[in-house]
Amino acid sequence: MKRLRNHLIGIDQGDVVLFSDFEHDGIMWTGEGPRQTRAYVHFSEAFRSVPAVRVGLTMWDISNHANARMDVTAEDVSETGFAIVFRTWADTKVARVRVGWQAIGELRQADDWDIY
């Protein structure tokens, strides 16, 4: 459990279109085997410490001629942002993906001082 030390709790959220590979025969749509893409998200304001981040699919357009395989996760989370990472493998054909995200954590207080 993440414990927050003050009443200044921030929630930042958004949606990111990671790719639309069917439009230009990109690797997620035409490729096979392990594939991944990532997009870096910058928070609208820095958190005081590393926030809790959740990601999930808000749109997934895939071919019906192969199995649906995917993994979406948040990596490299810091006070200022994180990377959304989407992976697929084998013969899955992914036309496009949009990912929603939410970050919850402590915000800086007016009397926070950075001495060093």
Image (cartoon, rainbow, N blue to C red):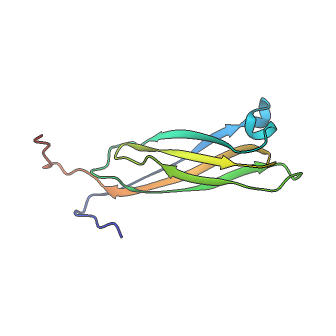
In this picture, residue 93 sits left or right of residue 20: right
Residue visible at 60% across and 49% down?
A: 99
Residue visible at 85% across and 52% down?
A: 66
**Residue 5 occupies which quadrant of the picture?**
bottom left
Q: Residue reaching furthest bottom?
A: 1
Residue visible at 23% across and 50% down?
A: 108
Asked whether 7 or 98 is in front, the reply is: 98
Residue visible at 60% across and 53% down?
A: 72
Asked whether 3 or 7 is in front, the reply is: 3
**How far from the left and from the top, in percent, is residue 54?**
50, 58
**How far from the left and from the top, in percent, is residue 101?**
52, 52
Asked whether 44 or 36 is in front, the reply is: 36
Q: The C terminus appears in which quarter of the rendering?
A: top left
Q: Residue reaching furthest right?
A: 65
**How far from the left and from the top, in percent, is residue 32?**
79, 42
Q: Residue reaching furthest top?
A: 24
Q: The N terminus appears in which quarter of the rendering?
A: bottom left
**How far from the left and from the top, in percent, is residue 34?**
70, 45
